[in-house]
């Protein structure tokens, strides 16, 4: 009977197992939302890379696991990008190859306290470096960061106010590493337990030290979610439904009304009739209306996705053009090379244009910071808006393409982290769900509007003016992780120099014999 170890001698079977192990953390994200699974979700992957027979095989285990992880958290893209989803997952999965090498470097065999301590510092830092690289917009952005799985855990949200989602990822990988050591190395259980206790103590201290966002007022913000509208003439029919749902808010005294992404499919300068209808809604409800225009602009070339504020007198002039675009969904990177993606999936037929700066809008004394679609996944954008004085963060989104997948709930959950990080409430308004509102501590402010709902709903949103440590100090966990990796590189470099064998110094050449007149002596023949 073949043993499991013999079964793993096949490179393909081992790669498949690594991919499955890398996919396990998906269960901690919505829709399963098994947040309690995240502290152990990486353990099978760590154990596999630790037991790799060679360094090269450990790198392949890291790569395969990264492929599984990226494919799992983006699996809802498959019906739209088809085979290209697998290509992107394979390319981004390669970022975890060095992480697999480091797992084997620190945990292979029977590591002593020194290597275990190094693993608890280096492996979380290396994971954070991977998240940093893949957070670049051109590589798809920071969707599926491990720390984002804790969006509904109050203590974790408190920690997010200290170090952002980065700190949560760092702590989760550290806990996974300690658990892996506990599983495989009895002799090292004491240092592993000590590491878990230190992690818990540090997290508890940060939790207690972080300032609580005390409420200092409330505003009433309405979200208008029209639901799925498809087929011929859908932009006009969607506008009609949004108008109907907004008119139903008359008498509820909202301070601001938010429509979802692409809620208006026409440039309002080209369609003054639509601008007048929205202004009439603003007068009837007594609130400014933040719509989102996805159309070719009349004042400059190209298509923009823009948050546009309309008041009782029409366009206010406040406008934010989306800056970070979704690769393939809103533009095709290197279109001259990758343009074929439009023939195998639903990639953008024409690239959208980018905005140049973030905007904070004044709505009757309330300062709001708009973002569009997956910009809510970027912690630095909400932090910058908060530093510029935004009292409420707003994300306008449309996930109707992925209506029957886990994507809408995953997207809505990100707003909880952005709220907790900044100490500012956040409104996540969509066309077709899930729409959600969170208070300044990241807790829900009212129920979600699900994907089967078409409604206009007013939320009482608490305000806070606290400056969180994350807003003040920024991405300090990332800098700490990079310092750890720099120290590792320096240490390994010094060791390599010290281990290099020294060459023996050449013996001095004998002085040639000379005659009495100091002429070179002739050799004897």
Image (cartoon, helix red, strand yellow):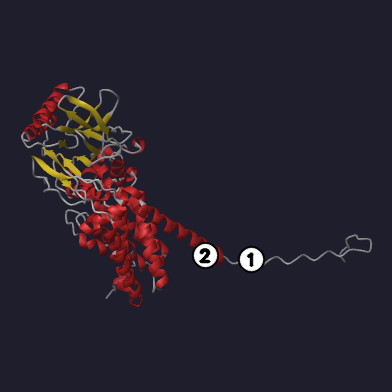
SS category of the residue bearing label 1: loop
Residue carrying label 1? 503
Query: For this rendering, which residue is in front, 395 or 92?
Result: 395
Spot occupied by residue 493 in the image (x, y as percentages of width and height) = 51, 60
Tell me if mark 2 has few (under 14), some (14-19) or many (20+) residues whose alpha carbon lies within 10 angstroms of its own.
few
Q: Is residue 474 visible?
A: no
Who is closer to the viewer here, 473 or 409? 473
From the top left corner, tell me how far across and down residue 435 is, in percent.
15, 44
The relative height of residue 290 versus residue 196 in the rendered view (above or below) is above
User: Seen in the image, is 162 located left or right of residue 59?
Assistant: left
Q: Earlier in the sequence, mark 1 or mark 2?
A: 2
Identify residue for label 2: 495
- Asked if 174 appears above or below 349 in the picture, the reply is below
Examine the rendering and report whether any part of residue 270 can be seen.
yes
Instruction: State the separation of the CA atoms marked 1 and 2.
Output: 17 Å
**Helix, strand or loop at disc 2?**
helix
- Kindly indicate whether the residue at mark 2 contacts the one at mark 1 (C-beta within 8 angstroms): no
* Residue occupying image coordinates x 32% and y 58%: 170
- The C terminus appears in which quarter of the rendering? bottom right
Residue sticking out furthest to the bottom: 187
Q: Residue 87's x, y, as percent?
A: 31, 48
99 and 472: which one is in front? 472
Q: Nearer the viewer, residue 283 or 381?
A: 283
């Amino acid at each position: 009977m073949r043993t499991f170890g013999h079964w793993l001698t096949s490179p393909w079977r081992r790669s498949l197992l690594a991919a499955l192990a890398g996919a396990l953390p998906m269960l901690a994200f919505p829709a399963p939302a098994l947040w309690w699974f995240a502290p152990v979700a990486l353990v099978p992957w760590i154990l596999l890379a630790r037991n790799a027979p060679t360094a090269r095989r450990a790198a392949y285990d890291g790569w395969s696991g990264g492929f599984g992880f990226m494919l799992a958290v983006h699996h809802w893209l498959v019906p739209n990008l088809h085979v290209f989803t697998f290509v992107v997952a394979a390319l981004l999965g390669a970022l975890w190859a060095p992480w697999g090498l480091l797992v084997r470097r620190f945990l292979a065999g029977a590591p002593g306290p020194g290597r275990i301590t190094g693993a608890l510092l280096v492996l979380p830092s290396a994971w954070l470096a991977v998240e940093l690289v893949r957070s670049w917009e051109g590589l798809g952005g920071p969707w599926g960061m491990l720390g984002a799985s804790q969006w509904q855990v109050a203590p974790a949200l408190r920690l997010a106010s200290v170090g952002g989602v980065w700190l949560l990822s760092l702590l989760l990988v550290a806990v996974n590493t300690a658990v892996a050591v506990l599983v495989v190395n009895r002799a090292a259980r004491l240092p592993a337990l000590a590491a878990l206790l230190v992690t818990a103590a540090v997290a508890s201290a940060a939790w207690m030290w972080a300032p609580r966002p005390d409420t200092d007022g409330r505003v009433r913000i309405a979200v208008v979610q029209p639901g799925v509208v498809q087929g011929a003439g859908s932009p006009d029919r969607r506008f009609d439904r949004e108008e109907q749902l907004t008119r139903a808010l008359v008498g509820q005294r909202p301070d601001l009304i938010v429509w979802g992404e692409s809620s208006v499919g026409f440039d309002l300068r080209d369609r003054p009739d639509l601008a007048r209808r929205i202004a009439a809604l603003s007068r009837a409800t007594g609130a400014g209306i933040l719509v989102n225009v996805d159309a070719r602009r009349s004042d400059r070339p190209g298509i923009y996705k823009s948050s546009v504020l309309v008041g009782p007198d029409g366009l206010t002039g406040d406008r934010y053009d989306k800056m970070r675009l979704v690769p393939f969904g809103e533009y095709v990177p290197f279109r001259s090379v990758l343009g074929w993606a439009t023939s195998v999936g639903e990639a953008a037929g024409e690239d959208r244009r980018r905005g140049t700066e973030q905007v904070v809008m004044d709505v009757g004394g309330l300062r709001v910071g708009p973002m569009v679609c997956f910009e809510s996944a970027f912690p630095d954008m909400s932090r910058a808006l908060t530093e510029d004085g935004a009292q409420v963060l707003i994300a306008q989104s449309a996930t109707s393409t992925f209506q029957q997948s886990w994507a809408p709930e995953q997207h809505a959950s990100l707003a909880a982290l952005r709220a907790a990080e900044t100490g500012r409430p956040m409104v996540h308004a969509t066309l077709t769900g899930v729409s959600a509102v969170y208070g300044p501590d990241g807790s829900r402010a009212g129920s979600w509007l699900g994907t089967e709902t078409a409604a206009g709903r007013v939320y009482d949103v608490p305000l806070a003016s606290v400056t969180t440590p994350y807003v003040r100090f920024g991405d300090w966990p990332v800098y700490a992780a990079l310092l750890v990796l720099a120290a590792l590189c320096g240490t390994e470099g010094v060791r390599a120099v010290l281990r290099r064998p020294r060459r023996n110094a050449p013996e001095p050449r004998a002085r040639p014999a000379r005659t009495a007149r100091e002429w070179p002596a002739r050799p004897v023949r």
